[in-house]
Image (cartoon, rainbow, N blue to C red):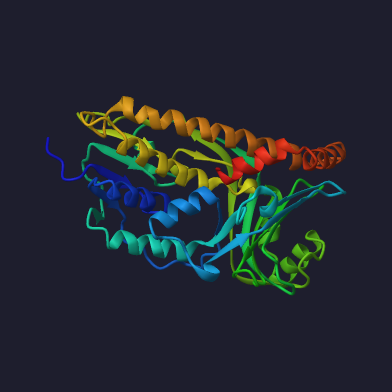
Amino acid sequence: MAFEHDLCIRGAGIVGRTLALLAARDRLRVALVAPPAGPPATADVRAYAISPAVQALLQSLRCWPEGVAATPVLAMQVQADQQGAVHFSAQQQGVAALNWIVDVPRLEQLLAEAVRYQSAIDVIDAPVAAPLTVVCEGRASATRAELGIEYDSVRYPQHALATRLDCERPHEQVARQWFTSEGDVLAFLPLGGPGGREVAVVWSLASERAALVAAWDDATLAAHLHDMSGDALGALQVQGARASWPLVLAHARRWVGAMPGRVGESFALAGDAAHAMHPLAGQGLNVGLGDAAELARVLAARERWRPVSDLRLLRRYERARQGHWLRMRWATDGLQLLFGHPGPLAGPLRNWGMTLFDHSGPLKARVARLAMNV
């Protein structure tokens, strides 16, 4: 059977569009499934921590947001409920920034513009047959379910709440995180460039309290976040919408395989369609874009006689990315279990562990390098 495209990518989010651009750059013909979307019901308050490795990837595609849309993080402060603390700095690691906090709508806009001007990418409304179908539809992927792939999911007893704050004092390009005695995890991520006073908030809190917090007005929420953050940035004001979602640890049993009943066609999963993790380390999108980069690399480096649907080829991708995801999974899940556990006995252990880790030297440097993907 003759195919018009080499790849059919189902899902036109950040991971799907990035993979499409990488594949097209390597002269593969791509069909990108992007059904028309209506206007968002509320403003998008999401912001992602982008690692140096992923920043270099996006720059290579000319899709890196400039100016205030990408704020370099020069330091990270992690504090427990007592005296335990961990500090990271870009200077100590010998890098320009530990990561960048990127405004999601601007990044999505740049990727969409790049796709529109790439002649090797056809944006279509519905899937088409292709030697390789890549599923980038997110955690609730319909295609993954149609393929009968089991998705093991364990729900944390937490929900995440995201919003944005205007702060009395500038953030000074510091990402801040607090672990509380109740098991909450609160993060303030700097936005608006080096002199900015805006932060993106990600607050992981007990699921049974999520509905109560959702009912708070902006002033009550701001006052609570001010107290939780210990007046780190002065008076706070909630700006814009809020978003909330349940937190899960999940992964697909298979990431590659043959398309059922379709000779010569295979599939691969990438991004949240393949895995999901706790947001406390801010690695979800980095791991997803790492999937896109590795799959594109494997396809570009294949032997000339090997088609993109070859399962031995695709298993190279699966082995590489499953290994990386497992390392990140154990790191983030372990942090959540150790530092996000409530109770009187967990507090002293949490604070002692953080202080010990902060003075661990090579171990601390190794964890920082893992988070930066360098």
Q: Is residue 139 visible?
A: no
* Res 198 quadrant in image: bottom right
Residue at point 82% right, 38% down? 356
Residue at point 12% right, 35% down? 1
Q: Indicate left or right for 119 with 149 as reference.
A: left
Q: Residue furthest left?
A: 2
Q: Indicate left or right for 197 with 234 as reference.
A: left
Residue at point 60% right, 49% down? 282
Give the image location of residue 325, x and y in percent: 53, 35
Relative to 62, does residue 235 appear above or below in the rendering?
below
Give the image location of residue 144, x and y in percent: 38, 38
The number of numbered discs placed on residues in the rendered structure image is 0
Q: Point out the image quarter for the C terminus.
A: top right
Q: Is residue 333 visible?
A: yes
Give the image location of residue 84, x and y in percent: 84, 46
Residue at point 27% right, 28% down? 310
Q: Indicate left or right for 257 with 67 as reference.
A: left
* Res 13 quadrant in image: bottom left
Q: Indicate left or right for 235 with 283 as reference.
A: right
Give the image location of residue 295, x and y in percent: 37, 39
- Of the pair 168 and 46, the residue shown nearer to us: 168
- Of the pair 301 and 232, the residue shown nearer to us: 301
